[in-house]
Image: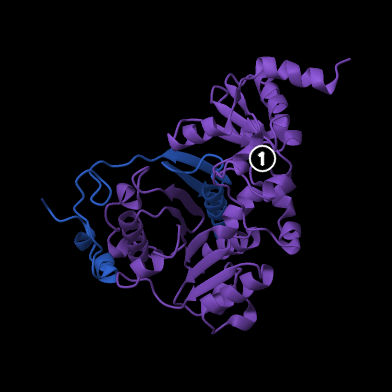
Amino acid sequence: MLPGVLGVMMATEAIKYIIGIGEPLIGRLILYDALSMTYREMKINRDENCPLCGENPTITKLIEDYDAAAEDPESLAPAAD
Amino acid sequence: MKSYRQIVEEAKTDIPEVTVAEVKAEQDKESDFVLLDVRDEDEYRAGYIPNAVHVTRGMLEFSVENHIPDRDQKVVVYCAAGLRSLLAAKSLREMGYTDTVSVAGGYRDWAAAGYPTVQDKPMTHEQLDRYSRHFMLTEVGEQGQAKLLDAKVLLVGAGGLGSPAGVYLGAAGVGHMGIIDSDVVELSNLQRQILHRTESVGTPKVQSATTTIKSLNPDIDITPYNLRLTADNVEEIFSEYDLIVDGCDNFATRFLVNDAAVLMNKPIVHGSIFQFEGQVSLFKPHEGPCYRCMYPTPPPPGMVPS
């Protein structure tokens, strides 16, 4: 049942975004807990040091093999300056 | 008792009028104002001024706040010839909108001047019926439905999250949907992955997803991608879509989706679940955080729930 709740929230966000209505979840993370039937909202900020979308990104093109990289998290990390 | 003429004359003393040439000039300068079309649905359907917000005169007081929440926003109101818009602009003043003007000559003069107009793709009788409940929501309306029908959304994963998302996006009339998944349906999927049916076990998920959504809404087109998203194919696939709905179930794909979306400036609706908890957000590149702002790298393999 849990994925149903989350998937419908995702569809709702998609539809709001397409039509351009309401408050989109940009910068906000909704955390849903089915057992306690509660949800929390967390503010999430852009990281200016983000290796991808930060001010000086170190990731400027795709990594070749994401499967291999997921096995070896360090290889997904930005290269040292 | 006031005659219609008196009411209009009174409105004219309260509400400044502008010509279509002035509106055009302001639009060309990209001035900050909202152009509000208050004509009836059928008039609007026949064509409107680009970027206009549509609220019929009849629904104006009920729903204008949903479209124009800022009462100090400049509002330029037009109708067919400039009378209803005068009255509408006056009602807006009474509601506390401080800067409302009416377009003299309205849409008639605009079109006669040869200025650009737009017309939403006319909806069929079946579409008008199918989406009629959306039209009752003033925030959606025919304009919103037209946007949905024009939208191109890519669903990454046709599993637990992709199923309900795909069903509702399809039902709502998102006109173009891509679905990417390399798995086949297994019996153990069916307890939650509502896109698939018992008779689909053993067949590709994208195929059964397409069949289910199409039977729910034959009005939309679906492109199935029976493959795994990789660095080699992601750019070609993403380039076809305006919005990515990421319901994938592994970190490799999640990072790939995030990286490609940021590099290509595509928004992602993000969702993930683990046991009884889940999270949702919307990552809009450069306007808000991306997945890597939260998690620069995946957790070590031993930590990954599967």
Q: Quadrant of the C terminus of chain B?
A: bottom left
**Residue lying at 83% horizontally and 23% vertically, measured from the top left:** B4
Give the color scheme: rainbow, by chain, secondary structure or one colour.
Answer: by chain
Question: Viewed as shown, does residue B250 lie left or right of B211?
Answer: left
Outermost residue on the right side: it is B1
Can you tell which quarter of the image residue A77 is in?
Answer: bottom left
Q: Nearer the viewer, residue B305 or B84?
A: B84
**Residue lying at 33% horizontally and 47% vertically, measured from the top left:** B294
Residue B61 in percent (x, y) is at 71, 29
Chain letter, disc 1 residue: B
Can the viewer see residue B101? yes
Instruction: Give the colour chain A carries in the figure.
Output: blue
Q: Nearer the viewer, residue B64 or A5?
A: B64
Residue B113 in percent (x, y) is at 58, 41
**Residue lying at 80% horizontally and 17% vertically, measured from the top left:** B6
Where is mark 1, residue-wise? Answer: B108
Can the viewer see residue B306? no
Q: Nearer the viewer, residue B275 or B227?
A: B227
Residue B137 in percent (x, y) is at 69, 44
Outermost residue on the front side: it is B113
**Residue lying at 58% horizontally and 77% vertically, measured from the top left:** B208
Identify the element where label 1 is drawn.
helix
Residue B191 in percent (x, y) is at 60, 69
Q: Which chain is purple?
A: B
Question: Viewed as shown, does residue B299 lie left or right of B242?
Answer: left
Q: Amino acid at mark 1?
A: Arg
Q: Is residue B78 above or below residue B260?
A: above
How many labels, in total?
Answer: 1
Question: Viewed as shown, does residue A29 lie left or right of B185?
Answer: left
